[in-house]
Amino acid sequence: MAWHTLPPDTTLQDVNTFEPAALRKFNIEMPQIPPRYHTTYFSHVWGGGYAAGYYAYLWSELIDDDAYYWFRENGGMTRPNGQRFRDMVLSRGGSQEAAAMYRAFRGRDPVVDPLLIERGLQAPKPDTTSGKK
């Protein structure tokens, strides 16, 4: 993402200098855990308009995890919960704005916490009503 925030008139950057500097800038440089992938591994992101599509995958995962947590918060994968999801989202297809359908189903906009929890980047919040995590 650091590449995509450079102003359009920025001179060509050396990838071997830019990457470590970007990691330091965002406080995510960890020598004991080096990056698995580097900029040059993602050449498909730079051409053909794929860059925005690539990051859309993460947005889809955020919505997926947030919706999954609705099920967890409301008794799990039960027939009534599945029917509610089917009635409010799946059966409507593209007949309404996706964000509006999701808001009606979830009762709010999606939040990032479930995604972070599922990726192990945030501890689950304790359930104050039942004592469960």
Image (tube, helix red, strand yellow):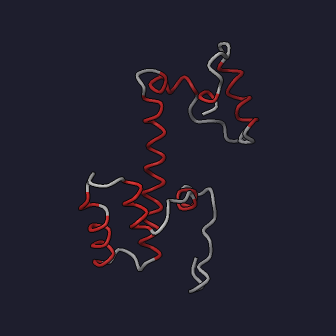
- Say left or right for 63 vs 127: left
Q: Report the number of discs.
A: 0
- Say left or right for 89 vs 54: left
Q: Which residue appears farthest toward the top when viewing the image?
A: 11
Residue 26 occupies which quadrant of the picture?
top right
Could you tell me which residue is drawn at 71 percent across and 29 percent down?
20
- Say left or right for 47 vs 1: left
* Viewport quadrant of the C terminus: bottom right
Question: Does 82 appear above or below 61?
Answer: below
Residue 91 occupies which quadrant of the picture?
bottom left
Question: Does 40 appear above or below 59?
Answer: above
In x, y percent, where is residue 99?
A: 41, 55
Could you tell me which residue is drawn at 56 percent across and 32 percent down?
37
Could you tell me which residue is drawn at 30 percent across and 72 percent down?
82
- Say left or right for 49 vs 18: left
Q: Which residue appears farthest toward the bottom when viewing the image?
A: 130
Question: Does 70 appear above or below 28?
Answer: below
Question: Does 21 appear above or below 61?
Answer: above
In x, y percent, where is residue 78?
A: 32, 78
In x, y percent, where is residue 19?
A: 67, 27
Could you tell me which residue is drawn at 27 percent across and 73 percent down?
83
* Viewport quadrant of the N terminus: top right
In x, y percent, where is residue 59?
A: 47, 48
